[in-house]
């Protein structure tokens, strides 16, 4: 389905979520081709939806690195692993709870916590990505 056809579908009121998913899968396959995709999976809504969509579109080409910072609900990290490790993707869980909790110990300002979490997430992801680089093309 072309973008114009998709826009016409929306304007006609015949749009459904299935239309959207099918269109996105087609676009992902066209853009990615035979290349590999590496996704930083936080377990939040955005990255989880992205991972699920990519897993439908290009499962054998997808590697998800789930950085478990230990700040989620009880057993949520295990639930995320359970969901994504069953798909035909390369799922890697990095347990970084001690690192995150150690750096957050004594920090009370919410904005400072947010910055620490964001920065450390990227650092952990990049470190794991570098260790995988020899395996990814």
Image (cartoon, grey):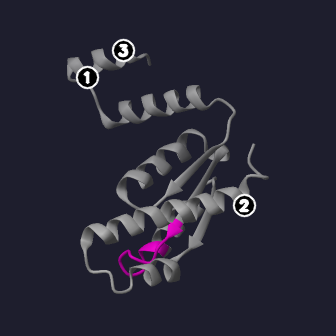
Residue interval drawn in magenta = 67-77
Q: Going 44% across and 82% down the picture, which residue do you hit?
A: 101
- Across and down, in percent, residue 106 comes to 34, 86
Quadrant occupied by the N terminus: top left
Percent x, y of residue 132: 72, 57
Cα–Cα gap, marks 2 and 3: 43 Å
**Image coords of residue 130 (percent x, y):** 69, 57
Element type where label 2 sits in the image: helix
Q: In the rendering, which numbered label is found on residue 5?
A: 3
In the rendered image, residue 74 lying in the magenta stretch gets the answer yes
Work out whether mark 2 precedes mark 1 in sequence or the reverse, and give the earlier one.
1
Q: Position of residue 98 (x, y in %)?
A: 51, 83
- Residue at x-position 21% and y-position 18%: 11
Q: Which residue is mark 2?
A: 131
Marks 3 and 1: in contact by CB < 8 Å? no
Q: Is residue 21 magenta?
A: no
> Mark 1 highlights which residue?
10
Task: Pick the residue in front: 133 or 6.
Answer: 133
Disc 1 or 3, which lies upstream in sequence?
A: 3
Q: Give the foreground label among 2 and 3.
A: 2
Helix, strand or loop status at disc 3: helix
- Badge 2: how crowded within 10 Å, few (<14), some, or many (20+)? few
Q: Are marks 2 and 1 in contact (CB under 8 Å)?
A: no
């Amino acid at each position: 389905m072309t973008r114009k056809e998709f826009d016409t579908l929306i304007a006609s009121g015949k749009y459904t979520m299935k239309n959207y998913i099918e269109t996105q899968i087609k676009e992902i396959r066209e853009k990615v081709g035979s290349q590999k995709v590496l996704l930083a999976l936080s377990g939040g809504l955005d990255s989880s939806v992205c991972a699920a969509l990519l897993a439908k579109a290009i499962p054998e080409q997808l590697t998800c690195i789930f950085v478990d910072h230990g700040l989620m609900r009880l057993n949520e990290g295990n639930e995320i692993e359970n969901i994504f490790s069953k798909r035909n993707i390369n799922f890697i869980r990095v347990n970084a709870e001690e690192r995150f909790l150690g750096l957050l110990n004594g920090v009370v300002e919410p904005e400072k916590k947010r910055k620490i979490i964001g920065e450390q997430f990227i650092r952990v992801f990049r470190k794991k990505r570098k260790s995988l680089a020899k395996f990814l093309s």
